[in-house]
Amino acid sequence: MVSRKYVGDYRLENVPDRHGKLKTVPVYRVPLFRFKAEETKVKRAKVRCLTLTALLTCALMVTMLLRVGILQRIYVVMPLVLSIPPAILLWMGVYNLLTAAGGVTREKSDHIHNRFAGWSVVLIALNALSLIGQCFAYFSGAEADGVPVTVCTVVCTVCASLIFAGKKDLTMEEIPPEE
């Protein structure tokens, strides 16, 4: 399934199937894309994104599984709950990144770069909001049992920041047509 933005990248062609019947299939007609960075940098970026996304997800899940008083405050827990969909979308970016071999379509190229750039910023903002709420909770008399939540939230923020900082290794360029 192709989103509406990328429909123009395909044209429909009639090709015979194995029984001789004509079948209409979409054919990609736009140049393919590849990573701009060197192969070693791309491999490191893949490992870094996979590791940081896994660490971010683990820290987020540990945070949500803790039973501490600070998580009973809505201004602390709501940004953390809202961080779950962006974390899932980061995993979709990791999947696209790990399956990108050789040339990729424009849609997949955009998904790889834009998912890591956009959703990591959203995660940074949501975790920062939760950290602000946690600071407010500590100043208003919350107990120190919430320190593991704060540590996990800081880990999530740092991981998202490192993913955002490493997005330059994931930029793509068109593969020039062979002459």
Image (cartoon, rainbow, N blue to C red):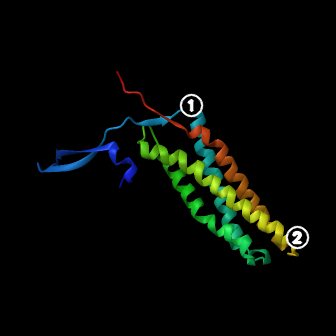
Question: Residue 79: image x %, image y %?
Answer: 68, 67
Question: Residue 58: image x %, image y %?
Answer: 66, 62
The residue type indicated by label 2 comes to Phe
Q: Is residue 45 visible?
A: yes
CA neighbours of label 2 inside 10 A, class few (<14), some (14 to 19), many (20+):
few
Circle 2 SS class: helix
Question: Residue 4: image x %, image y %?
Answer: 37, 53
- Name the image quarter holding residue 147: bottom right
Residue occupying image coordinates x 60% and y 65%: 84
Q: Which numbered tag is attached to residue 38?
A: 1
Q: Is residue 45 left or right of residue 129?
A: left
CA neighbours of label 1 inside 10 A, class few (<14), some (14 to 19), many (20+):
few
Above or below 65: residue 93: above
Gap between marks 2 and 1 measured at Cα: 48 Å
Q: Nearer the viewer, residue 95 or 153?
A: 153
The residue type indicated by label 1 comes to Glu
Q: Which residue is mark 2?
A: 139
Above or below 57: residue 48: above
